Image (cartoon, grey):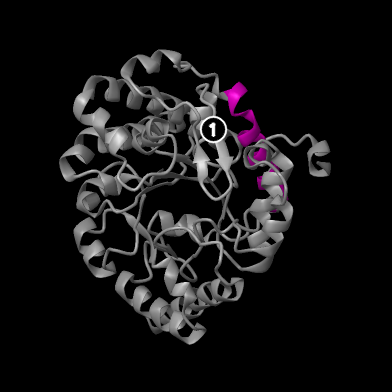
Amino acid sequence: EECYQLNVSPKDFPKLKNDAFLLACRGQETPHVPVWCMRQAGRYLPEFRESRAGKDFFATCRSPAACCELTLQPLRRFPFDAAIIFSDILVIPQAMGMDVQMVAGKGPTFPEPLKEPEDLLLLQSKVDVNKELDYVFKAITLTRHKLEGKVPLIGFTGAPWTLMAYMIEGGGSTTQSKAKRWLYRHPEASHQLLKMLTDIIVEYLLGQVAAGAQALQVFESHAGCLGPAEFQEFSLPYLRDIARKVKDQLKESGQDVPMIVFAKDGHYGLEDLSQSHYEVVGLDWTIDPRSARERTGGKVSLQGNMDPCALYAPKERIYEIVKKMLEGFGTRGYIANLGHGLYPDMDPENVGAFVEAVHAHSRHLLNLK
């Protein structure tokens, strides 16, 4: 934990040297298209596997020094334009008093998921975020110092519906049928839980900014299990609330931090998402770049959306795919990314080829202008 003896405080951060990502979030001109990857701090990196070997996943999340090291690893290898803090979306249900374990080969598991509305009484509805999630804030502050201004640091959270689904399903699920049962059978209790989560998320994101996060991403990973009507009722209003409340609070202290919303498989909600107070809408690979531009009408910057599996292709093919993607999105108000996270069996060399292709091809397009 040597980094930690510095007892770093969230001020006097090093000056930012590469602000391309933040400029792109706001739709301003950039020297090249910025690029980062979801799960860029992940098991595809041998050094990540080595750091994590034999350690409990959530114990790692609670160690600011470990999170800092894992966040910085991909940046030592690749010229990414942003770092995203190593953490997990399930730290919020944990802060509410639920037990969550990371089970090998199975993923996150809740031994006692929520079964009926009366189970809501077992949750901590008023969470002291500064006490319960202090370890995330410390990790952000430490990492922001250790980045030495190389690139901006992104903080993140799971969205209310996605967290609710985990808390009821007790783990991953392809149908989310237990969680969706609540939406249809217990709509009031569902809204009560979603509201409870929203309040905690707002405090959590504000705490991340206070700790040094320079942008925020909200992951609605389970959007694809909802139809348009359920999305309108149980996801969108809370996504909007989060952005509005965070922005209102930040405005009071004269701060302005770009926010990204990523609703995986939520293509039916693209127009609505582009009018939800977020500067950036993240896209998965099932959306055509040109149609995404048309449907969002230039109201927001876009982030995405190469199919992660394209990284299994040979390098020359990756370059072609990137070229087509950049031509579809254009170079303004665009952040290159994958349409979801990196998989553990991916070759770091190919990740490097992806980053290089984005930088090289976007510089070429910008020079043509």
Residue 95 x %, y %: 54, 25
Residue 84 x %, y %: 56, 51
Instruction: Answer whether residue 181 is magenta in the image.
Output: no
Graded by Cα atoms within 10 Å as few (under 14), some (14 to 19) or many (20 or more), the crowding at tag 1 reads many
Q: Is residue 60 left or right of residue 34?
A: right
Q: Quadrant of the N terminus?
A: top right
Chain part drawn in magenta: 130-147
| Residue holding disc 1 | 100
- Viewer-side residue, 61 vs 275: 61
Secondary structure at badge 1 equals: loop
In terms of image quadrants, where is residue 304?
A: bottom left
Instruction: Answer whether residue 139 is magenta in the image.
Output: yes
Under mark 1, the amino acid is Val
- Residue plotted at (71% across, 44% down): 55
Residue 188 x %, y %: 24, 20
- Residue plotted at (42% across, 65% down): 29
- Viewer-side residue, 256 vs 42: 42
